[in-house]
Image (tube, grey):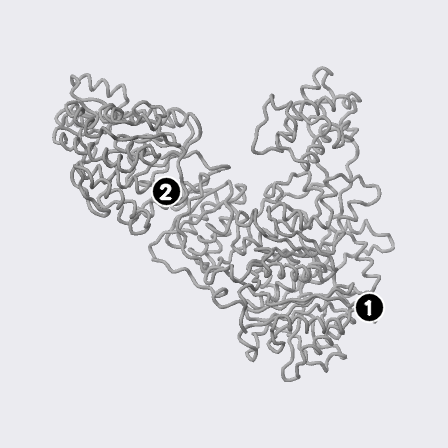
């Protein structure tokens, strides 16, 4: 059976089902373990429901039902205010979270679909919330209207995710969500959309509807759904929010994307004028539907191994469906058709029933097992002669069926709209579980992020548990990198073995530290980033070898730099992994590594907002900004290293723990034979000069307990020993052509940003002789904004000095130093630096092992808030009531100002903004409704304020002046209008 490439595949599942089921794995566990989830309605909800019933209809004991938790919602994740969340239909709230869970299960971050052609298809028949929200005597507002409409289920989802395909809410009663799947499949396969979100919702908030169904005799008095069983006596109403993600098979990657099952076809029809009336099922229409679906899909009906039936447990419903199945499939007693219904586990989820059945069928196709249908003992007597069988224990997929598993799913609306979907198992390449191959010592980055600190801790705990359960570490890391959105609270784990990763994640979950853990940090936005290029001493014996072997862009850049320098006198050939010998070779190797590292960072999407270079490093910094061409930079390095090599036997550099002032005193004491080569920090000064003087000072400082160390392979740069060579050096580099550059280069000669065009021969001649003023340059940069300083080096030499500078001057900032930020080879150190940048808001595209399928992780965590019964009154009510009239305006304008500011998370309003109209500040029409609710809570006399009042005076000052006359009524806070009773949960 050949699979067309445009076939729709189910790649992600999210579900909230009775019994505390959340996610596909928990659902599958419930099914194969044969558990039921029907129970008495929880007491907290039953009391509210019972109060809405007429006394004669209100039983003492709670009804049996399948219920889910409907009160909690993470409104902050979706940018929804608490006021709006309080009046939303719980179906909308839960649908938003469940859709995100399905997307993440598919390995699709929200950023990947935002702005694209994703369609949202929601099936729902529940009107409970709307009936309660607009009941007589209620006082609904515009937010209530948006929170109650059925169309808003799809519309709000599309809005929250910023997707631009069709957004449809479909109501065909119990078949709603399977009908939604039918139209989603067609749109996806036709190319109208690229991804489909298909969902179903059903909540039980209005007991009057249950009372009506009970009056119709369709509900089970024993509280059990017994599909096709002799003892069947009706169904139990239940709740569900469920969603699946559909993608075209040819848009998914073998060995990369998981597909639970393929939608090979579907059909929808109607009973028309059936003999039994509007609410009676029609076997004729159902049989015609089945033949239509399989014929159109070109799937032989004899290959079907199982049908997930509508199977409500009602007498007429089960009879008509069984007769239709028997007629359409025409099996024999020797080869009966296996049928079942998930309603035996969960009850009837009505508008969500189709999608719940679809998910069960997809899991059957994926796992190759058929779960039992509960509460089934023997077939109804009138059905025993039919070639149908209901499995009463978990059963392996029938061997006699074709190796491609074919599963049918039926869903029938009580108004006569019928739907059937045909699923097949996905190709083996899309469903096999294969660990990602890698070398045992190869480190991986596992990023962890969340929108709140608590969710970050919870997520870390979940990831640790997944690794404990044997989920492949590279698969988890790959999914966390490319299949999740990255939020403001960030941490990262870098590890080679699962044990280290688990320990680091446990530490993060409990607020502790670990050598493999980086962060956590709070990064609302990408941090301002400055590349720092060190000078002498920033080399290692075998530097560059691992990075050159790992990253082609790095090795190619090394070749380009070496080729550029080969055109000039003084070039000493060098290759990564070899030890540079001599001053010229060391300086040219450092320059080569720095240019290659900067190029590697850029290839990963990490760019700098500014650069600063130390001595030799300033040349690489200038090239990185575009101020110097590679040819001019190579010419400059070769000439510079040639002149320094000529005086190398006369002196060197001595790094000390002296302050600048103390170092200057040492220079004076030695009659000026030494000089300050670099002021790197508050107590990080480098001296330069003759070897005999520096060696004596080295001994003296060590004796006094002051840090002193000779800089390896260093010539006496920035010293009087170069004075006689400056003219020759200037002549060698005359003709370089610096140019303007878009990135600031903060000079360590002038300590200020310098235009690229001024980096001429005269500048570089001065730069060779004058001291390096890194301390002042770093201070200047850090005073402008919180900064992440990234050292572009094989070996860190400046991190401690920069850290001390920030601490000494009490300036915010972070140093990312690949040379010292992690143990291990330079690849591990580089990855650790990339992970550190991630925690500060960057998104480095570090290498990710080819993903074999999304790791099977638990659904994402949420920062749940219980929806308040009534918003709290503002503490300003008392102040506004008791303040003298001449002080009320000042109090009120500050309160209005704060209310408007709270709606603009990315902007802080100033006093000058109080006369700017709201729409120019970024306040949308929906925000005005929220603003009105917040203003109403400021004082009891403001509870009658309407939106037009705000819109007619659309500034902070204008609104304040419009509100003042209402305060003159001087009602006390206790006289507030009684809060409106919220919809029943």
Q: Quadrant of the N terminus?
A: bottom right
Residue 752 pos. (x, y %): 35, 23
Q: Marks 1 and 2: which is nearer the front?
A: 1
Image: 752 above or below 863: above
Residue 904: percent from left, percent from top: 60, 33
Residue 485 drawn at (x, y percent): 51, 47
Q: Nearer the viewer, residue 24 or 112?
A: 112
Location of mark 1 (residue): 273
Q: Which label belongs to residue 474?
A: none
- Give the Cα distance between marks 1 and 2: 69 Å
Residue 298 screen position, x and y as percent:
61, 73
| Residue that appears at 50% across and 52% down | 483
The secondary element bearing badge 1 is classed as loop
Report if the CB atoms under discs 1 and 2 are less than 8 Å apart: no
> What residue does disc 2 label?
601
Q: Residues within 10 Å of mark 2 (few under 14, many from 20)?
A: many
Looking at the image, tell me whether mark 1 or mark 2 is earlier in sequence order. Answer: 1
Displayed quadrant of residue 269 = bottom right
Residue 825, visible in the rendered structure: no
Residue 229 sits above or below residue 549 on the image: below
Instruction: Spot the residue most to the top.
Output: 886
Toward which corner of the image does residue 794 lie, by quadrant? top left
Q: In what element is the residue under mark 2?
A: helix
Q: Residue furthest right?
A: 56
Q: How many marks?
A: 2
Residue 270 visible? yes
Whether residue 779 sits left or right of residue 862 in the image: it is left
- Between 320 and 868, the one lying in front of the other is 320
Horizontal relation, residue 663 to residue 673: left or right: right
């Amino acid at each position: 059976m050949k699979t067309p490439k445009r076939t729709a595949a189910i790649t992600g599942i999210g579900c909230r089902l009775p019994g505390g089921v959340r996610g596909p794995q928990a659902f599958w566990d419930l099914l194969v373990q044969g558990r039921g989830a029907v129970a008495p309605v929880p007491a907290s909800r039953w009391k509210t429901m019972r109060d809405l019933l007429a006394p004669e209809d209100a039983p003492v004991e709670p009804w049996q039902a399948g219920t889910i938790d409907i009160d909690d919602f993470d409104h902050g994740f979706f940018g929804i205010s608490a006021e709006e969340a309080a009046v939303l239909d719980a179906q909308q709230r839960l649908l938003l979270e469940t859709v995100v869970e399905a997307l993440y299960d598919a390995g699709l971050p929200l950023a990947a679909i935002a702005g694209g052609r994703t369609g949202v298809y929601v099936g729902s028949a529940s009107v409970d919330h709307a009936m309660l929200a607009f009941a007589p005597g209620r006082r609904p507002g515009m937010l209530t209207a948006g929170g109650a409409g059925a169309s808003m289920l799809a519309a709000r989802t599309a809005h929250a995710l910023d997707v631009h395909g069709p957004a449809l809410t479909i109501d065909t009663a119990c078949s709603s969500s399977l009908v939604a799947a039918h139209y989603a499949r067609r749109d996806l396969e036709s190319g109208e959309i690229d991804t489909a979100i298909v969902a179903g919702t059903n909540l039980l908030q209005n007991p009057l509807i249950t009372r009506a169904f009970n009056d119709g005799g369709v509900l089970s008095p024993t509280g059990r759904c017994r599909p096709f069983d002799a003892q069947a006596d009706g169904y139990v109403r239940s709740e569900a929010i469920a969603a699946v993600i559909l993608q075209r098979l040819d848009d998914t990657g073998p060995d990369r994307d998981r597909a639970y099952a393929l939608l090979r076809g579907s059909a929808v029809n109607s009973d028309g004028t059936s003999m039994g009336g509007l609410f009676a099922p029609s076997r004729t229409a159902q049989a015609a539907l089945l033949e239509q679906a399989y014929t159109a899909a070109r799937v032989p009906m004899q290959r079907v191994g199982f049908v997930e039936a509508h199977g409500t447990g009602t007498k007429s419903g089960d009879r008509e469906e069984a007769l239709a199945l028997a007629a359409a499939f025409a099996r024999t007693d020797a080869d009966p058709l296996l049928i079942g219904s998930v309603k035996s586990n969960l009850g009837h989820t009505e508008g969500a029933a189709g999608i719940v059945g679809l998910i069960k069928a997809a899991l059957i196709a994926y796992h190759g097992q058929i779960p039992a249908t509960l509460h089934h003992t023997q077939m109804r007597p009138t059905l025993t002669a039919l070639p149908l069988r209901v499995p009463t224990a978990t059963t392996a997929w029938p061997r006699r069926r074709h190796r491609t598993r074919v599963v049918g799913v039926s869903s029938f609306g009580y108004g006569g709209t019928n739907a059937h979907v045909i699923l097949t198992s996905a190709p083996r390449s899309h469903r096999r579980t294969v660990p990602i191959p890698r070398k045992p010592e190869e480190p991986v980055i596992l990023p962890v992020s969340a929108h709140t600190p608590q969710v970050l801790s919870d997520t870390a705990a979940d990831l640790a548990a997944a690794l404990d359960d044997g989920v492949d570490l590279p698969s988890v890391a790959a999914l966390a990198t490319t299949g999740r959105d990255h939020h403001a609270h960030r941490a990262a784990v870098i590890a080679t073995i699962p044990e280290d990763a688990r320990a680091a994640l446990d530490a993060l979950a409990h607020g502790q530290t670990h050598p493999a853990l980086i962060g956590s940090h709070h990064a609302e936005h990408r941090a301002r980033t400055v590349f720092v290029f060190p000078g002498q001493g920033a080399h290692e014996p075998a530097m560059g070898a691992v990075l050159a072997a790992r990253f082609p862009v790095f090795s190619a850049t090394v070749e380009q730099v070496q080729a550029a320098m080969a055109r000039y006198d003084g070039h000493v050939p060098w290759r990564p992994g070899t030890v540079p010998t001599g001053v010229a070779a060391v300086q040219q190797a450092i320059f080569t590594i720095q240019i290659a590292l900067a190029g590697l960072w850029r290839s990963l999407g990490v760019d700098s907002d500014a650069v600063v270079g130390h001595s030799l490093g300033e040349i690489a910094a200038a090239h990185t900004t575009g101020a110097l061409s590679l040819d001019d930079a190579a010419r400059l390095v070769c000439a510079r290293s040639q002149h320094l090599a000529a005086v190398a036997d006369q002196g060197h550099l001595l790094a000390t723990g002296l302050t600048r002032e103390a170092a200057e005193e040492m220079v004076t004491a030695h009659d000026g034979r030494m000089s300050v080569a670099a002021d790197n920090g508050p107590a990080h000064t480098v001296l330069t000069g003759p070897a005999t003087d520096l060696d004596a000072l080295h001994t003296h400082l060590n004796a006094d307990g002051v840090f002193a160390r000779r800089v390896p392979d260093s010539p006496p740069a920035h010293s009087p020993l170069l004075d006689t060579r400056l003219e020759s050096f200037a002549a060698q580099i005359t003709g370089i052509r610096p140019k303007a550059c878009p990135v600031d280069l903060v000079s360590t000669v002038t300590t200020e940003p310098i235009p690229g065009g001024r980096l001429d021969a005269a500048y570089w001649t001065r730069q060779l002789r004058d001291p390096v003023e890194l301390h002042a340059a770093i201070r200047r940069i850090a005073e402008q904004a919180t900064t992440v300083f990234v050292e572009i080096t094989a070996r860190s030499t400046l991190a401690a000095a920069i850290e001390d500078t920030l601490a000494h001057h009490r300036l915010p900032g972070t140093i990312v130093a690949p040379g010292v930020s992690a143990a291990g080879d330079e690849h591990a150190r580089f990855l650790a630096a990339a992970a550190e940048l991630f925690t500060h808001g960057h998104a480095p595209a570090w290498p990710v092992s080819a993903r074999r399928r999304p790791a099977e992780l638990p659904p994402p965590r949420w920062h749940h808030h219980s929806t308040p019964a009534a918003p709290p009154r503002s503490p300003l009510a008392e102040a506004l009531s008791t303040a003298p009239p001449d002080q009320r305006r000042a109090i009120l304008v500050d309160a209005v100002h704060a209310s408007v500011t709270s709606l603009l998370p990315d902007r802080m309003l100033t006093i000058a903004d109080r006369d700017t109209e709201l729409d120019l500040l970024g306040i949308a029409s929906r925000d005005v409704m929220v603003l009105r609710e917040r203003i109403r809570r400021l004082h009891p006399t403001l509870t009658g304020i309407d939106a037009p009042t705000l819109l007619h005076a659309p500034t902070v000052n204008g609104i304040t002046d419009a509100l003042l006359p209402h305060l003159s009524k001087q009602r006390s806070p206790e006289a507030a209008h009684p809060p409106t009773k919220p919809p029943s949960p």
